[in-house]
Amino acid sequence: MKAEKINALERQRQVYVNGLSGIKPLVPVDMDKLAQKAAESISKEAYAYIATGASRELTVASNRNAFQRWEIIPRMLKNVSNRDTSTEIFSTKIQSPIVLSPVGVLEMAHKEADTAVGKAAASLGIPFIFSNQASIPMESVAKTMGDAPKCFQLYWSKSNELVASLVKRAESCGCRAIVVTLDTFLLGWRTRDLDLAFLPFMEGMGIANYTSDPVFNRLLDEPKEQALAVKPKVTLTTIEKILKLNRRYPGGFFKNIRSGRALAGVKQFVNIYSRDTLTWKDLSFLRKQTKLPIYLKGILHPNDAKMALEEGIDGLIVSNHGGRQVDGSISTLAALPKIAEVIQKQIPIIMDSGIRSGADIFKAIALGADAVGIGRPYVYGLAIAGEAGVREVLINLMADFELNMALAGCTSLEDITKDCLVSV
Ligand SMILES: Cc1cc2nc3c(=O)[nH]c(=O)nc-3n(C[C@H](O)[C@H](O)[C@H](O)COP(=O)(O)O)c2cc1C
């Protein structure tokens, strides 16, 4: 699939020309309005799940505030008429230093979920990191993306056999890297979800990569004790949710009701989805399973970056999961420079959590990132207008970055260095 080339000036002009016909952009360009419109487009549970941070949401705020501690010093008279925002990541040349971070349970934002995002990403040649918690099995999403860049994000399950199976599937469907998320071996204390007493996985959402997995299904057929630690009190809501789950779960509604498989599948998922005993030593297992590059997502400490280098890891994602895990955690922009110092360009660094504008992308690149990851903004675009909404959010960010780069006096990513910034 050939990626459409985006030109910032054309995009900007198109919006203003459309304005002459009374046509407004499909999704708000302003990121706060984007979130607000998404909130109006989906259920309050869905919006809370997407927007929430951990606990007091201090890290969500800190991710944003960190960008204000660095300011860009634009340089003048530099002839920036030839601009190149391209770079290389996951062994792929991309037109803008942006990747789509993995986001689970996209069906809560839009029924086409991961497929819509995959198509939008593919149309622009932007790499899409499939979430382990996707709403649609990775093979189906990969198929709609053709040869466009894609990766698979892994949550390390309690079952190594399941880990191996997921990784093999990712390899077979054309993923270019395995991204292991390290920061979610337990779920953060997510206030908004707790207040609504809502977790989508409990209702069978976001587990498509499990229910389509041969190892997961084989484990389900093995007799075992699978009780959830806490059993729900049966109310009308319970019955309604169980009916929905049986409808959602593969296999057919009546068959699921009769066999109890849907409920058993959710229980099994809850029991095995993550492992809190994981250590650096376990990584060698993964290395034996795949020839694909392995990226670690959730690195924030320079010593962990050093360990990753020593382990022969192929790339890092500096991330705090968009502030959804450790409340009060260091912001990613604050963590980035020390990690970049350790890495010394030996392996690529992607930074996510809080990127909302071209200037944010510029600052992350200047402080040592090779590319940035976007999370919530594309999900908001998806919630408002499906595939077209995701595309528009991405195009806006790409155009904003290109213009900001040029106006700062830079013509390529190589020009964007720490000297372009001042710490304030
Ligand atoms: C609703 C939601 C679901 C997420 N699901 C996953 C996931 O399944 N795997 C993962 O590694 N990260 C997940 N993340 C974290 C993102 O990959 C990314 O780190 C974060 O969203 C970046 O911050 P931003 O939303 O401020 O851009 C999720 C984030 C959100 C908002």
Image (cartoon, rainbow, N blue to C red):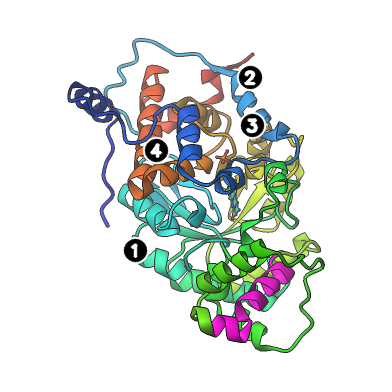
Q: Are marks 4 and 2 in contact (CB under 8 Å)?
A: no
Can you give x and y, in whole percent of width and height, for residue 131 in the image?
54, 58
**Is residue 261 highlighted in magenta?**
yes
Q: Which residue is mark 2?
A: 69
- Marks 3 and 4, how far apart in space? 20 Å
Q: Which residues are magenta?
A: 255-273
Q: Secondary structure at mark 2?
A: helix
Q: Which residue is mark 4?
A: 393
Q: Secondary structure at mark 4?
A: helix
Is the CB atom of the residue marked by disc 3 within 8 angstroms of ligand 1's nearest atom? Answer: yes
Which residue occupies 57% across, 71% down? 243
| Mark 4 surroundings: few (<14), some (14-19) or many (≥20) residues within 10 A | many
**In this orientation, which residue lies closer to the viewer: 272 or 245?**
245
Which residue occupies 64% across, 24% down? 65
Q: Earlier in the sequence, mark 4 or mark 2?
A: 2
Quarter residue 276 falls in: bottom right
Q: Which residue is mark 1?
A: 144
